[in-house]
Amino acid sequence: MNHISDMVWGAVEPSEMPSSRLRLDFGLRPAILRFNEWAVPGLGGAFFVRQLSWSCMGLRLAHELNGLTTAAKIAEALEALAGWIVVRQAGDSRVEDDRVQGKRKFKQFSSLSFDEITRGGAYVTVPFRRAATRALPGMGFCTEEARFSALTLTQEGSELAESAMSDAQARIRMVNWVSAGTDQISRVSEPLRKALVPQHASDAEKALVKKMVLGDERRAVLASLLRRIPVERLADNGGREVFLDGLPDAAMRKRMRTCFAFEDLRTASLAAAQEVSNEISGQALSSTQLAGRTEIAKRFEKLDAASSAVRELLDSEAPIEVTDFCAEQAHTSLSHRVLSLCFRIPMIFSVVGEQIDKGVGYTTDLISDEPLGHPERSEGGALSVPRPILRLKRLLLETGERFEHVS
């Protein structure tokens, strides 16, 4: 959305950036991680069942292969293989499933080997495995460690891996594919497809994930509120207050209120950056010229309001990154605030002095970086709601949890 010191696969070419979840975190990544944990403790970036299964399978197989390769490489390769299977089976049809990455890259592959997907010609910059690194210990599938490959599966983590690899034929094929390195898979058996593709997560996997999600009292409270309150209502103050009133203690309410305000700040920042992008689409402009544009002034007025709301809620536990960001957008001229925001996303904007031009990653339609998927799309469009709440609901929906307001 990035934040974990592990391997990054490949380089994104400028022409691919609009579809590659371009990073627009405005230098707030540490704050985003902190507020994500405040919003839904222990969830990390998990939003679908197989995201967790792939990771546990990687850890399990790495142990069985006695250090032949790392757990991170195996988990990412299984994720890649699953994506390739979906893309290849779709043929010329477009793959809409956001649990599948590398849609454009995989159309070029008629076969896939473990070595090529882990060393060169990589298909994605941020695999879903990364987002699961925090979720695995947070949900009780692994012991707590800083690096993914150092994680140790708990009994529940081993059970999740075994549930996904319950078919002996599929398991042997995975082990042989990883062990051989250069072995090319060109035809996929039905057992292997079902063991990997996201839509085929088994009932056993779903039941276990649901149990572990709801096993934490704080997550269980949030789930109970989401059963009664539509996510759409959390984008307005009235719905938020109802949601906040349902939280059990003052500390949890204060943290959640800060998370909502921070999400408003992120939304306002993206909207302001989008307007700058619109204005310079024809030619480079100075920050003074931009400050004189009506739509720029409107967008930055909303950003100022969102920044003020966050500042009022910050305390000694607040991440320094968000404190600094709010300070940049306070009590300064509009032209200075425009420059400050553009400096924070150098891939989009090239800033020389007061001149703002297109950067190497410029696009007319900015996309918020969300390597953890876009669960908000299932709720009818982008919402100013903390992503972890959206991810929690989506994950529970896949496990069979019922929400009264879902048709």
Image: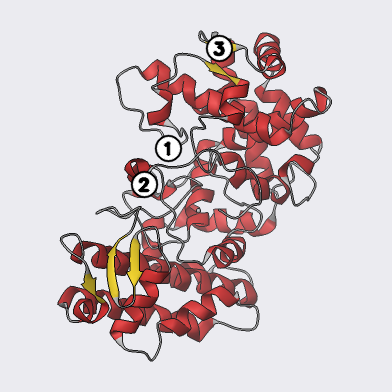
Foreground tag (2 vs 3): 3
Q: Please identify, in this view, whether the residue under mark 1 or under mark 3 is nearer the observer.
A: 3
Q: How far apart, in angstroms, are the residues tagged by discs 1 and 3? A: 23 Å
Which badge, 1 or 2, is on the more N-terminal residue? Answer: 1
Where's residue 327, x and y in %? 47, 84
Number of residues whose C-alpha sits closer than 10 Å to that of mark 3, classed few (under 14), some (14–19) or many (20 or more)? some
Query: x, y (%) of residue 15?
Result: 32, 42
| Residue at the disc numbered 1 | 98
User: Which is nearer the N-term, disc 1 or disc 3?
Assistant: 1
Contact between labelled residues 3 and 2, with CB atoms less than 8 Å apart: no
Q: Secondary structure at mark 1?
A: loop
For marks 2 and 3 on the same chain, the one whose residue lies earlier in the sequence: 3
Side of 281 relative to 322 (left or right): left
Secondary element at tag 2? helix
Residue 75 percent across, percent down from the top left: 65, 32
Residue at the (63%, 37%) spot, across then down = 52
CA gap, disc 1 and disc 2:
9 Å
Residues at marks 2 and 3, CA–CA distance in whole angstroms: 33 Å
Residue at (66% x, 11% y) in the render: 173
**Would you say residue 120 is visible in this rendering?**
yes
Question: Of residues 336 and 102, which is closer to you in this image?
Answer: 336
Q: Disc 1 or disc 2, which is closer to the eye?
A: 1
Q: Is residue 203 left or right of residue 296?
A: right
